[in-house]
Image (cartoon, grey):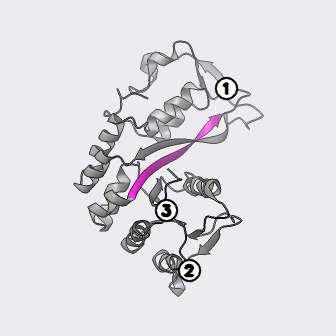
């Protein structure tokens, strides 16, 4: 998706979930001598060589919206907007994508499907949202188990959430946190991301254009094969990287996805 010539790619999630790191990784991946990349951020969190980065300063009128208007006069190939906070920034991002730019940005929503309705609620016309947003990725961070003290665990069906793929643990044990000197008796060391990528297919575009609810958009995306945050979490649990408790802590179960394929 990050190789598209134009359009908007959004990353959503709460503060501290790694959205900026993900976007910086995308910029590093597509950076080249022939690609002009300009960012407008608040604040500039990492300094990236070969990329022009602008720190917004609202007290002097240098907002996301005003800086983006100036950026487009320099004819960049790729633009990163730190966050879409208001209608002005959203409209400028839409305009940038319509004029042939690839736009990356973040948005505060609980899941990927909520990004479409959030932009429409801000005041952006639905036909603009459906025609410019190419993909939305929601992400969360969960703690990873300490490899020195994790303990194999064979839970019963009643000990696991209803949507857990219990039939897949017959050959592979789950693990739980214990705590040792290496992890300072916490049971966890490091973190790993859970990801939910919603690609804007023709069906999703039509639903967004028709002002469908985020619930309906998510339902359609799951039917088309989207792996949700919860399912991504269960994959990490089955791989022995994190625990059921961690996934339950940061994700929400949903009856829509209980029987969906992973």
Residue at image x 42%, y 70%?
Answer: 99
Q: Nearer the viewer, mark 1 or mark 2?
A: 2
Magenta residues (range): 133-147
Q: Are marks 2 and 3 in contact (CB under 8 Å)?
A: no
How crowded is the residue under tag 3: few (<14 C-alpha within 10 Å), some, or many (20+)? many
Q: Which disc number belongs to residue 102?
A: 3
Q: Quadrant of residue 54?
A: bottom right
Q: Helix, strand, or loop for circle 1?
A: loop
Nearest the viewer among 4 and 144 is: 4
Q: Nearer the viewer, mark 1 or mark 3?
A: 3
Nearest the viewer among 178 and 173 is: 173
| N-term-proximal mark, 1 vs 3 | 3
Residue 105 vertical position relative to residue 182 in the rendered view, above or below: below
Q: Helix, strand, or loop for circle 3?
A: strand
58 lies left or right of 227:
right
Nearest the viewer among 214 and 163 is: 214
The quadrant of the image that shows the C terminus is top left
Residue at image x 47%, y 49%?
Answer: 137
Which residue is label 1 attached to?
150
In the current view of this chain or complex, which residue is farthest to the front?
Answer: 34
How crowded is the residue under tag 1: few (<14 C-alpha within 10 Å), some, or many (20+)? many
Q: Helix, strand, or loop for circle 2?
A: loop
- Which SS type dominates the magenta stretch? strand
Q: Is residue 81 visible?
A: no
Residue at image x 43%, y 51%?
Answer: 135
Please check the rendered image and state whether residue 65 is part of the magenta-colored stretch, yes or no: no
Which residue is label 2 attached to?
57
Please check the rendered image and state whether residue 136 is part of the magenta-colored stretch, yes or no: yes
| N-term-proximal mark, 1 vs 2 | 2
């Amino acid at each position: 998706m990050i190789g598209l010539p134009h359009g908007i790619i959004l990353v959503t999630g709460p503060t501290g979930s790694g959205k900026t790191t993900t976007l910086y990784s995308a910029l590093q991946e597509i950076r080249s001598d022939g690609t002009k990349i300009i960012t407008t951020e608040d604040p500039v969190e990492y300094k990236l060589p070969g990329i022009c980065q602008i720190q917004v300063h609202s007290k002097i009128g240098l907002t996301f919206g005003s800086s983006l208007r100036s950026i487009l006069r320099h004819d960049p190939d790729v633009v990163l907007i730190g966050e879409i906070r208001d209608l002005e920034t959203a409209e400028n991002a839409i305009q940038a994508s319509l004029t042939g730019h690839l736009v990356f940005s973040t948005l505060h929503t609980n899941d990927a499907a909520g990004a479409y309705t959030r932009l429409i609620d801000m005041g952006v016309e639905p036909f603009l949202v459906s025609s410019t947003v190419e993909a939305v990725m929601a992400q969360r961070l969960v703690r990873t188990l300490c490899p020195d003290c994790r303990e194999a665990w064979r839970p019963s069906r009643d000990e696991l959430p209803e949507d857990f793929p219990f039939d897949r643990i017959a050959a592979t044990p789950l693990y739980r946190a214990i705590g040792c000197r290496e992890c300072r008796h916490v049971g966890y060391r490091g973190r790993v991301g859970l990801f939910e990528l919603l690609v804007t297919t023709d069906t999703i575009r039509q639903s967004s254009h028709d002002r469908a609810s985020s619930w309906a958009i998510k339902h359609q995306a799951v039917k088309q094969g989207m792996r949700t945050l919860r399912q991504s979490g269960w994959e990490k649990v089955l791989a022995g990287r994190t625990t059921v408790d961690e996934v339950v802590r940061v994700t929400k179960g949903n009856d829509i996805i209980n029987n969906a394929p992973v």
